[in-house]
Amino acid sequence: MLDSTPGPRSDEAPLLQTVGLTKRYGTFLANEAIDIDIWPRQIHALLGENGAGKSTLVKAIYGLIQPSEGEMRWLGEKMVLSGPSEARSRGIGMVFQHFSLFDNLTVAENVALGLDGKESFKDMSARLQEVSNVYGLPLDPKREVWQLSVGERQRIEIVRALMQNPKFLILDEPTAVLTPQEADQLFVVLERLKAEGRAILYISHKLEEVKRLCDTATILRGGKKVSTCNPKFETAASLARMMVGADIKEVRASAGRQVGIPRLVVNDLNLEPDDAHGVRLEHISLELRGGEILGIAGVAGNGQDELFAALSGERPSRDPGTVVIDGIAAGHLSITRRRKLGAAFVPEERLGHGTAPRMRLSENALLTGHAASGMVQHGFVNTAAMLLTVDRATETFDVRKAKRDPEAASLSGGNLQKFIVGREILRNPAVLVVSQPTWGVDAGAAAVIRQALLDLAANGAAVLVTSQDLDELAEITDRIAVMFHGHLSEPMPTADASREKLGLLMGGSSLEPKEATHAVRA
Amino acid sequence: MELAEAIILSVLAASTPLLIAATGELVTERSGVLNLGVEGMMIVGAACGFGGAWLSGSIIVGAVCGIVAGTLLSLIFAMMTLGLAVNQVASGLALTILGIGLSGLIGAGFVGERITPAAHLHIPGLTDIPLVGRILFGEDAFVYLSLALVVGVWWFLYKTRAGLILRACGDNHTSAHALGYPVLRIRMYAVMFGGACAGLAGAYLPLAYTPFFIPGMTAGRGWIALALTVFASWRPGRLVIGAYLFGAVTILQLHAQGAGIGIPSQFMSSLPYLATVIVLVALSRARTGGSTAPAALGTVFVPDR
């Protein structure tokens, strides 16, 4: 296998090696006897489902946790890390998935905190400028992080890691929050780092990306290493099979889906931002018919949250006509009134928005079902009906949990998401508005949820899906529109929506240069 | 004129304990820990400070006793909130109740005794300048110390790496931990500094303000110090302005009562809190984003190992 990959020669030791690395939490084995070799001049992918043990392994390599058994070798010699600062001084850098940034500190201060403080703040700031120029990652050192976009925040993390001149850089799902174009820019930087002789460990869920970028892939499942392979010789399906350990059920739309009458209509919706971070929605119009799934793509923070709030009634409008549900003007109505009209909503955040984390599933079922179900009778709650809803959702959507009615927070992300989507679908809604349906959900659960959305549409409901995952939208939607700076593009048939087209719209470029030329002539 | 000078002198004296206690609490809160036990640490500092000074005859020994007592009490708080991850609000309130009880016990033997209060600076020539001489060059050592303390804390927070790390812990403890900073240890030091300051602020009362100890003599100054930290929006510079403003309100309230002005004294004593609320609203409206308070303030942190 090694012969097929460029870089390493058999007579030298790998840059970093883990030998039988095991991490135990109580009786739970998060990592079990993992052997992994990292060579210079290579981009090494680390693949696995949520809970496969990727972050545990990476935390051990970065010195954040101590392995229970096994050892790490750095250039062939045993290495025990007392903490991240020792890892950094050896030449190991890390770009975190949930950025390890400080919102209320400046860019320069954030970078300084990631370094070991041996140089003065002034020298550090100068070097920050230099590194960010060299790698084409522009940053303004004086801005506070909360003012920056997600892409800019990631730049801070990368520049911070590069300023330590690392031999080995770990990136945890770096493209999850980027537009395709931003991701391409990142790949250019990564290729360059590789050419400079550095090693990169690249964690990602996006298999096509891994095939394109990585030289080697190690696949984890259930805390164990399943295989090491060259992803260029694999297909996305074969990689996915190794990650899941079984074929993933293919999501399929039922044939002969009828597109019916308009069930959700939005007419010239405008919404002021409710805080300084918010986005102003401007002139949003769309029409969604029964049996149809409309996807809304876009980089996070372009007004998707505001649109969800406007549709769900969390932020009602003064003008009733802005949102029409099944022919009834509902723009001014509360969430409960909209639910009574047959609308259902699944917000992006599972814990805290979709469910009350410390309440039981049955209570969470009641929270959205109280208006239009048998769970409340004459002002009293019907516990039996609540539990029945939990059981039905459990059965229909394969929700795995330890007991019949646990607290919402005790479920894994995928299972909780299946429960939330199931809870809404069981109410048989006319309109379902769902935001990021499979964000952070493992492949198996994602397939169940996508299938459920397709089936719901097949039964005549109108489904609006907001997602940053273009593959997901391509798989389940009929039409796709893109949200940018509070504007919604004209929806296009999914068949015509190439990644490139969508990427341009997500980055704010208009598809039609005609308007511009008109303007010039005029 | 004599009256104005007297009022300013008494304002400075009344403001100093507020300034010292609030400076300590500011550092604690900047690290992300909300210690509502300031009142309790102050009153124990007052009892121990007076006891130390009375037994030894030295104001300095008294001040050190106050500092040590405040620090020890804050260590109990640190053990509960940082070691055992107990809710900070509940622990802080418990600390105040404990402190009030403890100070009565410690101070019981000293009630009715008197000491010679801390000497005031006297520089011949300078102190004798009319009007400003007494105010600028005739204070006790605590007044100068409190101002030096604020400058020191400002310099520490904004000009040193350790200060940056402390602010980072208060902004996002998860990130600070991920970068390898010992969040809990840093917070413990910050809590101890807060305790030491509260103890010193408490000791100031019997050592310099009134030369005797009575139970409950802090009379809510710890709560005002907490409000002051918020009023100052966690910035040392604004703390000085706020402390003298709050001190002035306290003194004016006494003078207003003496002069028979018909404003209820309860209203006057509520002014600091009212001002804090107004400032909070004004700040959150003025700021376009981010957070004025340390973002991790009052949240429990348990590192994974």
Image (cartoon, rainbow, N blue to C red):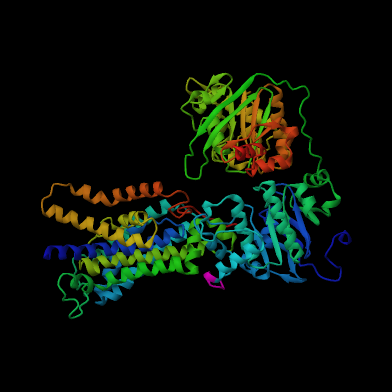
Of residue A324 and residue A40, the one placed in the foreground of this image is A324
| Residue displayed at 50% across by 45% down | A277
Give the quarter of the image for residue A262.
Answer: top right
Give the quarter of the image for residue B145.
Answer: bottom left
Is-magenta flag for residue A120?
yes
Q: Quadrant of the C terminus of chain A?
A: top right
Residue B15 x, y percent position in the rendering = 26, 62
Residue A89 x, y percent position in the rendering = 64, 70
How many callouts does the rendering have?
A: 0
Of residue B122 and residue A426, the one placed in the foreground of this image is B122
Q: Which residues are magenta?
A: A117-122
In-image side of A115 versus A243 (left or right): left
Is-magenta flag for residue A106?
no
Q: Quadrant of the N terminus of chain A?
A: bottom right
Residue A452 visible in image? no
Residue B237 x, y percent position in the rendering = 35, 62
